[in-house]
Image: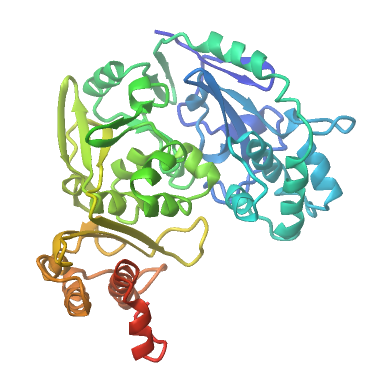
Amino acid sequence: MRQTVRFYLGEDLCTLRDLSPTLTLLDWLRDRGRTGTKEGCNEGDCGACTVLVVRLEDGRLNWRAVNACIQFVSMLDGAQVFTIEDLGTADAPHPVQSAMVEQHGSQCGFCTPGFIMSMAAYRKAEGASTDDQAIDDALAGNLCRCTGYAPIVRAMKQAMAAGPDRFDTQVAAISERLTALQDGESVRLEGSEGTLSIPASADDLAEILLADPEATIVAGATDVGLWVTKGMRRLKHVVPIGRVPELRALTRTADGLRIGAAVTYQDARPAIAELLPDAGEMIRRLGSTQVRNSATVCGNIANGSPIGDGPPMFIAANATLHLRRGTERRSIALEDYFIAYGKQDRQPGEFVEALTIPIPAQNAQFRAYKISKRFDQDISAVLGAFMIETDDQGRITAVRLAYGGMAATPKRASGAEAALLGQVWDENALEAARSAILEDFSPLTDMRASAWYRQTVAANLLTRFFEETTGGGQARLARTGGLAHV
């Protein structure tokens, strides 16, 4: 059992013994004089605090842009952190810095350090391209209100064409120093501001939670971080799970895809997209690059949010949730995990271990639709995810319609499903399902959408699903003079 948190800040090894479990990386950096990392929203939206975190995973370096404002220092054990001060100097700037100057990508400059760190991380991303859409996706988590994005995108393209940067020449050295930090030990720190436990195995995690069922598990901190920065909550015992190898496993089996509780959306997305292409596309709009680099698939489930984007998709796909308490394990249908608002089927000391998404049947059709005020980095007003199976006659043999934002929990539209099951997938079945939707949900009116809007959109998404999966949309549009429900 180690009693220190160890990581590199630039070239310096930091060994911390007296550490608040919820001290954010942003506050810690600025207290140390690294003021190039800016505080903007302090909730992971604006990207002004973006830093580059490097971890050794499966024998290779993983370079990720993350929001320092909602990343706890305690989560960085075994990593190396680079800030804007580490990139270059006036005499030897990083290629991204040179490009931003030459393309006039900075005006007031407040957002610039965050942009540059995201751009430096994108240069290191596997398969990174100069396609406009890919660059827009990479920078969607960085907000600028004075320069505009056109010169920044031009700078990104110029930087992509530049030669090696300082990181390219240090891969071996970084790998060596991070390898030396991988000691396989759990960490325990106790202080006046709380207890920190960093388990090195799933067995260690199980023991920690049995001893203290009230401890707070932290995976990516994209939700828990806001408890601290916005809710001002004091957490007595924090348990980061990012170093647990079993929970970082992403495994393809004969049954489907098993996603460990510490697997991020960024890492899981390619594998999910292989099974459910529409889910992969939807994940592109979940948060931002920085958020997806930290947020985990299972954390999005465990927090029980009624507007989480992942749960409706995985409920529609008939996913199974795996839980563990001590040495006891159980598996439940994902939809059964959500009992009521703020209440989930998880016992004291029990934790989410993994999620399994089954391989869809050959005749299955799946779609996921996110409705929000902004395309990028916005919370859903409604998310609809649908899966149907049909026989050779076009009759529906299986149907799962799941929604987020329509109830106190992610929920299936049972009445609409009943209206479709056994019916031919045609306009009559669609209209019956649309009518049933009005009885399935009684949504709330809030700042994101009115109850009327949510009910209307929920039904219209079924129409979109019908038109996309039957090819009947063009005929319908012709008969209605170009008007449709979508």
Quarter of the image that includes the N terminus: top left
- Outermost residue toward the right in this view: 91
Percent position (x, y) of residue 259? 32, 34
Q: How is the image coloured?
A: rainbow
**Image point (44%, 22%), residue name:** 192
Quadrant of the image occupied by residue 239 = top left
Percent of width and height locating residue 65: 59, 37
For the residue pair 32 and 12, the one nearer the viewer reads as: 12
The part of the image, by quadrant, that contains residue 422 is bottom left
Percent position of residue 64, x then y: 57, 34
Q: Is 204 displayed left or right of 131 in the figure?
A: left
The residue located at (46%, 8%) in the rendering is 183
Q: Quadrant of residue 247?
A: top left
Q: Is residue 238 visible?
A: no
Residue 280 picture location, percent across and down? 41, 49
Front residue (pair 231, 157): 157
Q: Identify whether 195 is placed above or below 225.
A: above
Q: Is residue 310 left or right of residue 416?
A: right
* 78 sits to left or right of 279: right
| Quadrant assignment for the C terminus | bottom left
Give the mark count.
0
Q: Is residue 21 left or right of residue 121?
A: left
Q: Is residue 209 above or below residue 428?
A: above
Asked whether 171 or 143 is in front, the reply is 171
Tell me the residue at 44%/26% (across/down). Answer: 193
Height in image: 127 above or below 137?
above
Residue 232 visible somewhere in the drawing? yes
Residue found 55% across the figure and 8% down from its top: 180
**Residue at far front of view:** 392
